Image (cartoon, rainbow, N blue to C red):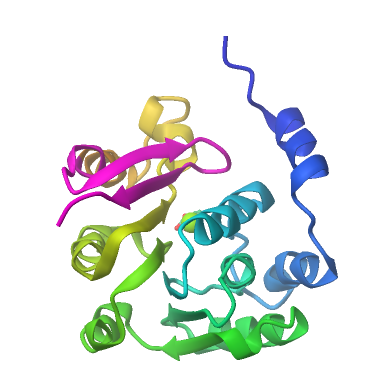
Amino acid sequence: MTIYNDEFSAYINSLFVPEDAALRRAREDSPKRGLPAIQIKPEEGRFLQFLVRACGAQKALEIGTLGGYSGIWIARGLSPGGRLITLEVEPLHAQVAAEHFAAAGVAERIEIRVGNAHDLLKSLPAEGPFDFIFIDAEKTGYPRYLDWALENIRLNGVIAVHNAFRKGSVAGLVEPDKHTAITQEFNRRFAGESRLLSTIFPAGDGMLVGVKVSN
Ligand code: DHB
Ligand code: MG
């Protein structure tokens, strides 16, 4: 029997997910500023923080900043001296995220780069390899983002990718939408990628996670 549901989510969060005022503000303020309310769930944020610390990340990369909620969690998992580079195509999102990073006390650890992520990634290999990469952006770009991540993550580094469940549609829980098929295809590819030891963390909208086990 599988019993994970909103009550267990709340139970986990009550025990393990210390959302301070800055995180709550980042979550609650973003929709009021006109950003879509599609940031990760608190327990997904805690899981990212856990992963970042578990792999001892000093160089982290995020593709898709949105309002900065996930970036705060990632930054708070970095080892001392660690840095996060986060890529965002919408200038308003980047501005709002910058405010949220400052309020959370992590602004010095994070650099926001504004532009099309596929373009920004072209010059980023010189700043790698990265210890941790989080992908949470336009779904049509995922295959190319994963190509890049596989080339630019260090051995034993971690790649996390949001929205593996596509609101439950990948498993037939709700009707498919325009991104269900590409999400299913992407999940199959991630699962079959021999350079990764991978799974899905089944909270929120599903988080693909893979550790790079071979070059
Ligand atoms: C959508 C995108 C996301 O990254 C997310 O977490 C939820 C929804 C979307 O485009 O619908
Ligand atoms: Mg997402």
Does residue 148 appear left or right of residue 101 in this picture?
left
The residue furthest top is 1
10 lies above or below 41: above
Residue 207 inside the magenta-drawn segment: yes
Percent across and percent down for residue 22 are 79, 73
Residue 100 inside the magenta-drawn segment: no
Percent across and percent down for residue 138 are 36, 64
Q: Could you say which quadrant of the image residue 38 lies in?
A: bottom right
135 lies above or below 101: above
Does residue 121 appear left or right of residue 114 in this picture?
left
- The residue at 50%/88% (across/down) is 111
- The residue at 73%/83% (across/down) is 105
- The residue at 27%/85% (across/down) is 124
18 lies above or below 104: above
68 or 150, nearer to the observer: 150
Viewport quadrant of the N terminus: top right
Please state the total of marks drawn on the protein image.
0
Does residue 188 appear left or right of residue 167 in this picture?
left
89 or 194, nearer to the observer: 194
Viewport quadrant of the C terminus: bottom left
Percent across and percent down for residue 194 are 16, 43
- The residue at 68%/52% (across/down) is 42
Percent across and percent down for residue 151 are 18, 67
Where are the magenta residues, as a range? 189-215
